[in-house]
Image: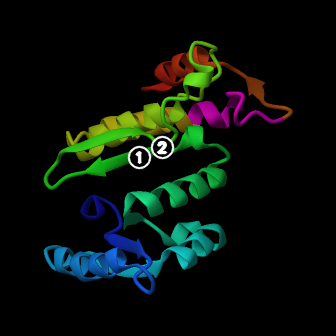
Amino acid sequence: MAMKRNKKVTSVDKANVLESSRLWRRVVPEVAKEYPEVTLDNLYIDNATMQMVRNPKQFDVIVTSNIFGDILSDEASMITGSIGMLPSASLAKGNFGMYEPVHGSAPDIAGQNKANPMATILSGAMMLRYTFGLSAEADDIEAAVKSVLSDGYRTPDIFTEGMKAIGTKEAGDLVASAIK
């Protein structure tokens, strides 16, 4: 993934305390040698969470364990305003991956037309880009999401006064209509 982006990876661990993170800290640089064009930085999880708030643009691709990834993704969701805005990918070697919203299934609001579909839509765009190599199509989807948000449409999780309130179905329809 980093090879198709800005060629910068940040590895997050807690190698100063956890034995599993010390192993992580030994293995990640070995894997990184296979990608000499990519810059690798290491951060402890406590520093990474602070840096995420302080300067999120410094990050491009973060590689970490599930436990630290859960912490960072929840924190990052507040930068966008909602966990309903964040796509995610769990990638294997090659072009294979599992793409899904960070937020999970949210069964408590199922069928109520108030879930934010943007993370699901953006996860689909990531799949097109990273698994199928369809960057132009992914760009179109991402541009459509930006267009809908720029036009002031908001699902309940990101709604603020002065915006246009919409539900799940309308959000999806608006994005589909905005794809060129």
Query: Which residue is located at x 68 percent, y 46 percent?
Result: 81
Left or right of residue 45, residue 128 in this image: left
Cβ–Cβ below 8 Å for labels 1 and 2?
yes
Please tell me whether residue 149 belongs to the stretch shown in magenta: yes
Instruction: Please report the bounds of the magenta region as a residue range.
Output: 147-160
Left or right of residue 166, residue 93 in this image: left
Could you classify mark 1 by the number of other residues whose Cα lies within 10 Å: few (under 14), some (14-19), or many (20 or more)? many
Query: Which residue is located at x 44 percent, y 31 percent?
Result: 121
Q: Position of residue 136 (x, y in %)?
A: 31, 40
Query: Which residue is located at x 45 percent, y 80 percent?
Result: 43
Q: Nearer the viewer, residue 17 or 34?
A: 17
Q: Position of residue 12 (x, y in %)?
A: 42, 73
Residue designated by label 2: 102
Where, by quadrant of the figure, is residue 157 drawn? top right
Mark 1: amino acid: Ser
Q: Quadrant of the N terminus?
A: bottom left
Outermost residue, right side? 161
Residue designated by label 1: 88
Q: Position of residue 151 (x, y in %)?
A: 68, 31
Where, by quadrant of the figure, is residue 32 drawn? bottom left
Mark 2: amino acid: Val
Left or right of residue 26, residue 165 in this image: right
Q: Quadrant of the C terminus?
A: top left
Secondary structure at numbered mark 2: loop
Secondary structure at numbered mark 1: strand
Applied colour scheme? rainbow
Q: Position of residue 146 (x, y in %)?
A: 56, 38
